[in-house]
Amino acid sequence: MKDISESDLQNNIPLVCRQDYKREVIAGNVEIGGKELTHMAGPCTVESRDQILETAKAVKEAGATMLRGGVFKPLTFPYGDPLGQPDAGAKGTGLDRNVVMTLPEMFKAAEKRLAYLREAGEKYGLAVVSEITYASSIDMMTDYVDMFQIGYRHMFNMDLIEVLAKTAKPLLIKRHYGESLRSLLGVCEHFEARGKHNFAICERGVSVAHTHNVDSRAILDIQAIPALKEYAPSVPVIIDPSHATFKRKYVAAMSRAAIAAGADGLLIEVHPDPEQAWVDPLQALGFSDFSNLVSELDGIRNVITP
Ligand code: PEP
Ligand code: MN
């Protein structure tokens, strides 16, 4: 892995690394990277209308300004419900675990859930962010989201880069766990070079061999926060402690550390009944844990930026 060199700054990533540039990243009515912290919260997967409405209400009351929720889940294995419901076939929901859903079927199911997400966002005044995994879903998704999330698996996906460079909506670009800041800034530069400037970066943990044990999945790269602020000061930095730690009990500590280190906000998984979450049940926070955490984070922010 190479360090960022002077030559990179001049030739490879000059736009994203501009030092005196005011970048406006606005999702719905939420300014990301401004004075206020941006708390993006919600379930890994939009499971039902009730689930997302209940979550939106709780995270809004806790102080979140954005609602997150996946409808296209980039799951590890192909069988079962591509939206993430465990044992969907076994539960008699009509999905056969050995049948892979067709793309039109998947888009239809995803759109239904996006409509719930949008409804919940509108009802509680929350801007909405959701991951895009298929370039061809962009028109359908555009009607429902205020911000597109690029998952870590898709950081280098040129189809997505091409279509997302053309949307007016802002982007949340997740760093792959095995990629350097140099590569991440290279992806940002791909957008800049195509005239797309309203994006934020999301750090969600880097992989180190010895972290692959039962207690953690990745190491949250806290140092990436001041490093990104040094190289690319105009780009808002969002930290995702949920996917980095994979463990609910570590989420609060990592969130506090991220805000203390200068992050502009957090992407946190919150679920009405975390242990029953369809996807990522080990890491989601319940409503009261999230609410307590937000108060602490706002307090930390006030200490470091009086
Ligand atoms: C997510 O935010 O739900 C997600 C799948 O993220 P990542 O790409 O970081 O795994
Ligand atoms: Mn998740």
Image (tube, helix red, strand yellow):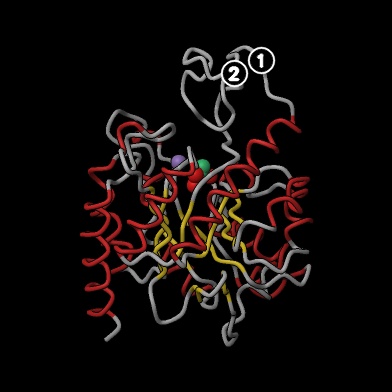
Q: How many marks?
A: 2
**Disc 2, SS:** loop
Q: Nearer the viewer, residue 243 or 176?
A: 243
Q: From what the image shows, is residue 159 above or below residue 296?
A: above
Q: Position of residue 293 (x, y in %)?
A: 24, 59
Q: Nearer the viewer, residue 118 or 35?
A: 118
Look at 25% across and 59% down and name the residue there.
Answer: 291
Q: From what the image shows, is residue 79 above or below residue 170?
A: above
* In the displayed structure image, the side of residue 85 where residue 147 appears, left or right: right
Q: From what the image shows, is residue 265 above or below residue 270?
A: below
Q: Indicate which label's residue lies in the foreground, 2 or 1.
A: 2
Q: Quadrant of residue 279?
A: top left
Look at 54% across and 78% down and name the residue there.
Answer: 234
The CA span between labels 2 and 1 is 8 Å
Q: Amino acid at mark 1?
A: Val
* In the displayed structure image, the side of residue 112 where residue 214 appears, left or right: left
The residue under label 2 is 95
Look at 47% across and 18% down and name the residue there.
Answer: 87
Q: Position of residue 127 (x, y in %)?
A: 51, 65
10 Å neighbourhood of mark 1: few (<14), some, or many (≥20)?
A: few
The residue under label 1 is 99
Q: Position of residue 47 (x, y in %)?
A: 48, 37
Q: Is residue 177 visible?
A: no
Q: Quadrant of residue 306?
A: bottom left
Q: Position of residue 148 (x, y in %)?
A: 62, 57
Q: Is residue 82 visible?
A: yes
* In the displayed structure image, the side of residue 190 where residue 148 appears, left or right: left
Q: From what the image shows, is residue 28 above or below residue 59?
A: below
**Disc 1, SS:** loop
* In the displayed structure image, the side of residue 286 where residue 162 appears, left or right: right
